Image (tube, rainbow, N blue to C red):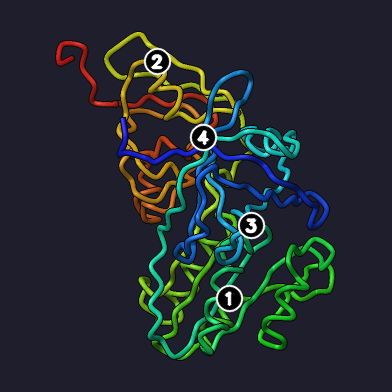
Amino acid sequence: MRFIETWTPASLVSTRDLAPGIREFLILPDRFDGAAYPVGSHINVSVTIDGLPETRSYSLVGEASPRGLRIAVRRAEDSRGGSRYMWSLQPGARLDITTPASLIAVDWTRERYCLIAGGIGITPILGAAQALARRGAEVTLHYAVCSRAEAAYLDDLSALLGDRLVVHASDEGQRLDLEVLFASLPQGSLALFCGPMRMLDAARHAWIGAGHPLPDLRYETFGSSGTLPTETFRVRLKGSNVELEIPRERSMLDVLNASGHDVMYDCKRGECGLCAIDVVDIDGEIDHRDVFFSDHQKQENRKICACVSRARGTITVDTLLRADAV
């Protein structure tokens, strides 16, 4: 069960490869007016994985365009199958997508903005850079990549920002030092971040360590990234003989709901915490991939966000659903 989403049919107009392993998709909804959408917006896309319907969330690239909606997808072998499905599509394919929605609130009154993108995390950051540059805001974008050859939209960003774009390419020895960067920012700066989970954890610690209020660090997340490889694990349900296998291509939330063990959810991105369920026992290790719980709560391992977090081995959970209450 979840809050209502608005779905609409669409067509895949075209694709283009931006960098090795990164492909852009231009999607045109059947009823499309080109209306502006908030910075940091995303759409959900209905995908099919191993014959089963699934949903994947992708950030919209850049500001609104009358040509349609753009997303960019990194081909990730260590994923739950969404990128493989998207990469299999050809122009003309029919899709079901949700209308754009944003979970990031940008305060446009700040004097200084710092944008940080890690790899494919550039997708929502590009639109923010465009909006801030158009407003004449004081903005700098720090773009962390393995190499410039793997940096999507690098030419566009260079033309837009000039020397306000700082590329941190690992193969050039220019790694991004978040502690130094955040320590250099004046109080009142607003930072917008999108990158893998480990980079986000480092950013949150560095931001707090530099004395900035945590609400001034706004971020998008990669729901599929974690500290452990994506692999099959098992979930036991407290007070029953039920044990479910969670394959690497599906989330614990999807398997629980498909099996009739209803778990409330909303964002499916590890941000809202609505799908959090109690952890009773752990025979293995939990890989918390959410940004809802604090570091302390993750260390306690008393709850898990079923939409994105995974495990190694077997965990026992309590969904609070009781047969005699149904």
Mark 4 element type: strand
Query: Residue shown at 59%/35% (left/top)?
Result: 95
Residue under label 2: 259
Rounded to the nearest angstrom, the CA distance separating label 4 from label 2 is 17 Å
Label 4, label 3: how far apart the Cα atoms are:
24 Å
Earlier residue among tags 1 and 2:
1
- Residue matched to label 4: 55
User: Disc 1, disc 4: CB below 8 Å?
Assistant: no
Q: Quadrant of the N terminus?
A: top left
For marks 1 and 4 on the same chain, the one whose residue lies earlier in the sequence:
4
Amino acid type of disc 3?
Arg
- Depicted 288 relative to depicted 125: above or below: above
Q: Is residue 182 left or right of residue 295?
A: right
Identify the amino acid type marked 4.
Thr
Residue, x 53% and y 29% (percent of image)?
54
Q: Give how far apart the Cα atoms at labels 1 and 4 are.
A: 28 Å
Q: Amino acid at mark 2?
A: Ser
Name the front one of labels 3 and 1.
3
Q: Secondary structure at mark 3?
A: loop
Q: Is residue 260 above or below residue 111?
A: above
Q: CA distance from mark 1 to mark 2?
A: 43 Å
The mark found on residue 129 in the picture is 1
Q: Residues within 10 Å of mark 4 (few under 14, many from 20)?
A: some
Q: Earlier in the sequence, mark 3 or mark 2?
A: 3
The residue at the point 63 percent across, 52 percent down is 71
- Near mark 1 (Cα within 10 A), the count class, few <14, some 14-19 or many ≥20, is many
**Which residue bears the numbered disc 3?**
67
Q: Quadrant of the C terminus?
A: top left
Q: Please name which of the two marks, 3 or 2, marks the residue nearer to the observer.
A: 3
